[in-house]
């Protein structure tokens, strides 16, 4: 089977589990670091002609990361597609198991079994910290309802103040974010790359946890270490003056 992945986390999952299956990936597919396959552009605007030239038996996509029109164009050209859409940790684990089995994995990979144990073995969460979770600025965009990253944070004792909003990615103003009076601001390094010098200054006096976006938003081998990595980062926020 020849597989092209337009989803970085699935690229890593397939490459680690079934070496040799991938024949193409996006420019944003950074893991595993040694992956050497043709690149087909970005997740949002892939080069469809490059994909067709690779003669894939299957193209992997995700509802949030990829555009519907690209999935439609691939299908119309006779290229089979598989679209993923996990919104919870359990959902991600189930989708990964189904995908890898269907791609020919003889058994569940060790990293997926380790991820199941890691998330099932979390201690009882302490009192949840009320937080806002920006994923972009200029304009500000935050996590809202029904998101995979939101479920990850919930399991780690973070209560998203925008989790009950009808939009999955609301766009409040900075004044509205401050008025929500969060006890914590969660700032991942992707899709927007928040850093100590870019993000915390917008919330003076409020603890800001700088998180690994790969561990917060990717569903693949990183899930096995995500609880430990993210818990450590949540426990060590920075506070801008």
Image (cartoon, rainbow, N blue to C red):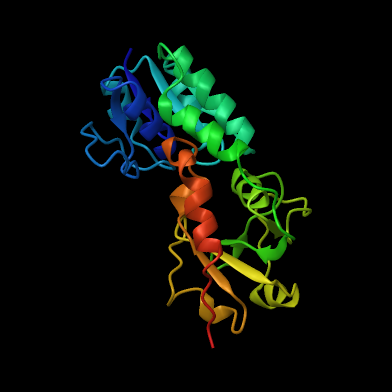
Count of numbered tags: 0
Residue 84 in sight in this render: yes
Figure check: 197 above or below 69 = below
Q: Give how far across and how far down residue 42 sits, in percent.
A: 36, 43
Figure check: 234 above or below 58 = below
Residue depicted at 48% across the width and 42% down the height:
218
Taking the view exactly as shown, the residue that stands out farthest to the bottom is 241
Residue 85 in sight in this render: no
Give the left or right position of residue 221, taking residue 153 as reference: left
Figure check: 206 above or below 137 = below
Q: Give how far across and how far down residue 172 sits, in percent.
A: 68, 67
Residue depicted at 42% across the width and 15% down the height:
103
Residue depicted at 37% across the width and 34% down the height:
12
- In which quadrant will I find the N terminus? top left
- In which quadrant will I find the C terminus? bottom right
Quick one: 75 or 166, which is closer to the camera?
Answer: 166
Quick one: 219 or 7, which is closer to the camera?
Answer: 219
Give the left or right position of residue 230, taking residue 160 as reference: left
Quick one: 15 or 80, which is closer to the camera?
Answer: 15
Q: Give how far across and how far down residue 175 sits, in percent.
A: 69, 78
Quick one: 43 or 119, which is closer to the camera?
Answer: 119
Q: Give how far across and how far down residue 73 sits, in percent.
A: 46, 25
Give the left or right position of residue 56, taking residue 129 as reference: left
Residue depicted at 43% across the width and 32% down the height:
10
């Amino acid at each position: 089977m020849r597989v092209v992945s337009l989803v970085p986390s699935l690229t890593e999952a397939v490459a680690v589990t079934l070496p040799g299956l991938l024949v193409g990936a996006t420019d944003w597919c950074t893991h595993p670091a040694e992956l050497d396959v043709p690149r087909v552009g970005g997740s949002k605007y892939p080069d469809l002609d490059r994909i067709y030239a690779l003669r894939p038996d299957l193209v992997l996509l995700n509802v949030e990361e990829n555009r519907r029109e690209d999935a439609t164009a691939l299908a119309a050209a006779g290229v089979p597609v598989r679209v993923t859409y996990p919104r919870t940790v359990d959902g991600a684990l189930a989708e990964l198991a189904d995908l890898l089995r269907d791609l020919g994995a003889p058994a569940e990979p060790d990293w997926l079994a380790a991820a199941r144990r890691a998330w099932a073995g979390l201690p009882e969460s302490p009192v949840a910290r009320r937080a806002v979770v920006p994923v972009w600025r200029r304009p500000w965009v935050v996590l809202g309802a029904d998101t995979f990253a939101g479920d990850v944070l919930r399991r780690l004792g973070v209560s998203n103040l925008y989790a009950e909003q009808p939009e999955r990615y609301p766009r409040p103003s900075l004044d509205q974010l401050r008025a929500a009076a969060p006890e914590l601001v969660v700032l991942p390094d992707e899709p927007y790359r928040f850093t100590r010098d870019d993000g915390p200054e917008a919330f003076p006096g409020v603890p800001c946890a700088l998180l690994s976006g790969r561990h917060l938003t990717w569903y693949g081998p990183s899930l096995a270490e995500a609880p430990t990595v993210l818990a450590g980062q949540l426990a060590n926020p920075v506070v801008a003056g």
